């Protein structure tokens, strides 16, 4: 069966009422059996596991073709648990344009534990290999990257990692399993901020790690999830399962809209450059065409002709694109990334990142037309 069918029909919770849709089980504690030892329902305390979380993790593992999923209260809680599975003295390679809070976690939380990292341009394979040290254990990928939409050739990086006995993580938040399945390309752990496309409505915070194999690192991270307790609530898990049911219906609209908007803006005289992997002008378009299926996703960045003020003016003049952070919801958002990343960030002053929603593309294009006319 195709995964869209399985997401709707499998792993749902059946109670005695005949309810067609899964109930939300809020109970934090579960009853022991008559023997006083066993737990006939399979659950004993909600931090360890609960039915809604179990359903969510089963669905997410299937979507990414993984052996298991461990879910968290946020995408960054998921990332933190990966870093907690390392040993003091370990070294990591991360993309030079990784989601900026990944660097903040490493600097502010793990620097004191002697975990070091090197920033590398993941499109430069020789550079990645040269950055490997004797204590390098992990190569981190993020494709498309944030906010420059660079495409990493996952198979190429995985083969470098294997050669040097490193494990790999791919942050698949932007591509989603609809467009890229890192597990199939050999990645050990696929990370999601489920806050984004998987949630899809900008109203749930969550994270997940999907494992290619249930190996020793999986066991460690599963134990950390239960002990550290950065877990999603039953209600969040239920909401997310509800979002997953419409995931395959939402994604093509995001992607088709993004492709059309990117083409429109690329031809516009007030736009300096478009960063969208679906455009033939994108520097890694051929890698994207090989690695991504069905399309290129709903995210793009634009460089406005002019300076920071021109970019902020454009963001302010748009009516349907809300100037706000985050991405992946049904509503279109636009954001001046430099303002949020700070002066130390390498992001260009005239860059705007766009999360293209599922509104009608005619309205989205019209909105840009009127806003660009005011520059
Ligand atoms: C949002 C995001 C994260 C962080 O996830 P949270 O759910 O906000 O903690 C990590 N990686 C990428 C690519 C993201 O877009």
Image (tube, helix red, strand yellow):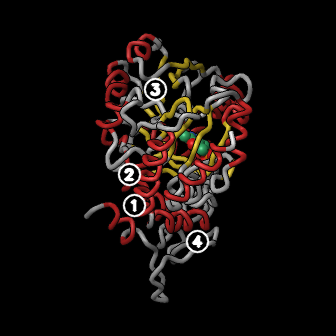
- Indicate the secondary structure of the residue bearing disc 1: helix
Q: CA distance from mark 3 to mark 2?
A: 23 Å
Q: CA distance from mark 1 to mark 4?
A: 35 Å
Residue 230: x, y in percent? 64, 50
Residue carrying label 1 = 248
Q: Is residue 356 above or below residue 134?
A: below
Between discs 3 and 4, the one toward the N terminus = 4
Residue 163: x, y in percent? 32, 19
Viewer can see residue 214: no
Q: Which mark is residue 178?
A: 2
Within 10 Å of disc 4 (Cα), the crowding (few <14, some 14-19, many 20+) is some
For the point 46% across and 63% down, the residue is 244
Q: Are marks 2 and 1 in contact (CB under 8 Å)?
A: yes
Within 10 Å of disc 1 (Cα), the crowding (few <14, some 14-19, many 20+) is some
Which mark lies nearer to you, 3 or 1? 1
- Indicate the secondary structure of the residue bearing disc 4: loop
Which mark lies nearer to you, 3 or 2? 2
Viewer can see residue 126: yes
Looking at the rendered image, the quarter that the N terminus falls into is bottom left
Mark count: 4
Which quadrant of the figure has residue 279? top left
Q: Is residue 292 above or below residue 31?
A: above
Residue carrying label 3 = 139
**Mark 2 Cβ and ligand 1 under 8 Å apart:** no
Looking at the rendered image, the quarter that the C terminus falls into is top right
Which mark lies nearer to you, 1 or 4? 1
Image side of residue 194 versus residue 73, left or right: left
Given residues 340 and 133, the one toward you in this image is 340
Residue carrying label 4 = 30
Q: Residue furthest bottom?
A: 17
Image side of residue 121 versus residue 226, left or right: left
């Amino acid at each position: 069966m195709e995964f869209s069918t399985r997401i709707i029909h499998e792993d749902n919770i059946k109670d005695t009422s005949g309810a067609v849709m899964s109930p939300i089980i809020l109970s934090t504690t579960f009853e022991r059996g008559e023997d006083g030892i066993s737990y006939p329902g399979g659950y004993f305390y909600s931090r360890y596991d609960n039915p809604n979380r179990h359903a969510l993790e089963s669905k997410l593992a299937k979507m990414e073709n993984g052996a298991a999923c461990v879910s968290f209260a946020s995408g960054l809680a998921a990332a933190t648990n990966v870093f907690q599975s390392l040993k003091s003295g370990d070294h990591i390679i991360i993309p030079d344009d990784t989601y900026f809070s990944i660097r903040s976690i490493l600097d502010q939380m793990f620097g004191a534990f002697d975990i070091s990292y090197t920033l590398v341009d993941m499109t430069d394979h020789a550079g990645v290999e040269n950055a490997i040290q004797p204590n390098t254990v992990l190569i981190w990928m993020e494709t498309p990257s944030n906010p420059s939409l660079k495409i990493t050739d996952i198979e190429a990086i995985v083969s470098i990692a294997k050669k040097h006995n490193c494990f790999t993580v791919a942050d698949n938040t932007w591509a989603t399993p609809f467009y890229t399945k890192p597990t199939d390309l050999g990645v050990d752990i696929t990370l999601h901020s489920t806050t984004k496309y998987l949630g899809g409505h900008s109203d749930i915070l969550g994270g997940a790690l999907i494992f290619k194999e249930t190996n020793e690192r999986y066991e460690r991270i599963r134990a950390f999830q239960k002990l550290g307790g950065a877990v999603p609530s039953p209600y969040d898990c239920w909401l997310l399962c509800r979002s997953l049911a419409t995931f395959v219906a939402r994604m093509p609209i995001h992607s088709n809209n993004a492709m059309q908007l990117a083409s429109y803006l690329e031809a516009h005289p007030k736009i300096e450059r478009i960063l969208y992997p679906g455009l033939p002008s994108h520097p890694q378009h051929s890698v994207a065409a090989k690695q991504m299926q069905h399309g290129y996703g709903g995210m793009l960045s634009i460089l406005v002709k002019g300076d920071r003020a021109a970019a902020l003016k454009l963001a302010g003049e748009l009516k349907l694109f809300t100037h706000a952070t985050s991405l992946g919801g049904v509503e279109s958002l636009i954001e001046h990334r430099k303002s949020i990343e700070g002066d130390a960030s390498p992001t260009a002053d005239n860059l705007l990142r766009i999360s293209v929603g599922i509104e009608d593309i005619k309205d989205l294009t019209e909105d840009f037309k009127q806003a660009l006319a005011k520059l």
